[in-house]
Amino acid sequence: MPASDHELEQAGNQLATLLQQTGNMLVTAESCTGGWIAKVLTDKAGSSAYVTGGLVTYSNDVKRALLGVSEASLKNDGAVSEPVVREMVAGALAATGAGVAVAVSGVAGPGGGSADKPVGTVWFAWGTGPGTTVASVQHFSGDRDQVRRKAVLFALQSVTGFLKQT
């Protein structure tokens, strides 16, 4: 079942409230979600109080140029990998001065999958700086829209859970 607009809005509101309560500013570094995480968070008026911005880094060249993702990580592990999303978090924090970042890179489909990274494979990372970054891989089913919706929901919920623990 894909995440509904209501579920995304609810998850975004929960994260927005928590960001405001903790005084954190968030930046997103998104690939397969194309800015959808930032969109959910900025749909609410006043979101500039907790969102510094979002970077849509769809191509490897832009991941390198804007986020400082290393050529070695991209070549050895691929864009859809733990090292890359961890570097995306670090780069987004460095580029914006935000207090917390979330990064996502995946294979939304319908093409582009492989035996080791089938369609629906999505890597996430979130954190507040060196030593705090958490990474997770998820395997979502469904078409492109469903995979992306599930990825956005997972990212919002994961950052919320992370901030509740810190």
Image: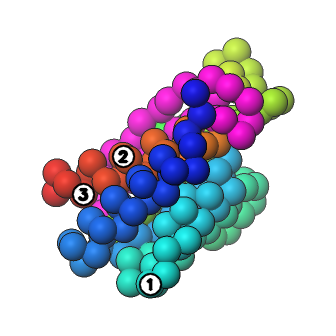
What is the residue that sits farthest to the left in this orientation?
A: 166
What amino acid type should be assigned to the residue bearing mark 2?
Ser
What is the residue that sits farthest to the right in this orientation?
A: 111
Residue 99 image position (x, y, % from top left): 33, 72
Q: Earlier in the sequence, mark 2 or mark 3?
A: 2
Q: Is residue 121 visible?
A: no
Residue at x 41% of width, y 53% of height:
11
Crowdedness near tag 3: few (<14), some (14–19) or many (≥20) residues, C-alpha within 10 Å = some
Residue at x 58% of width, y 27% of height:
1
Q: CA distance from mark 2 to mark 1?
A: 22 Å
Is 11 located above or below residue 38 in the figure?
Answer: above
Residue at x 28% of width, y 75% of height:
20
For the record, the magenta segment spans: 120-147
* Location of residue 49 by image quarter: bottom left
* Residue that carries the numbered disc 1 in the rendered image: 46
* Location of residue 93 by image quarter: bottom left
* Residue 120 appears left or right of 123: right
What is the residue that sits farthest to the front in this orientation?
A: 6
| Residues marked 2 and 3 touching at CB (< 8 Å) | no
* Residue that carries the numbered disc 3 in the rendered image: 163
Q: Earlier in the sequence, mark 1 or mark 3?
A: 1
Q: Is residue 20 visible?
A: yes
Q: Is residue 102 inside the magenta stretch?
A: no
Q: CA distance from mark 1 to mark 3?
A: 20 Å
Is 91 located above or below residue 121 in the figure?
Answer: below
* Residue that carries the numbered disc 2 in the rendered image: 158
Residue 133 image position (x, y, % from top left): 33, 51
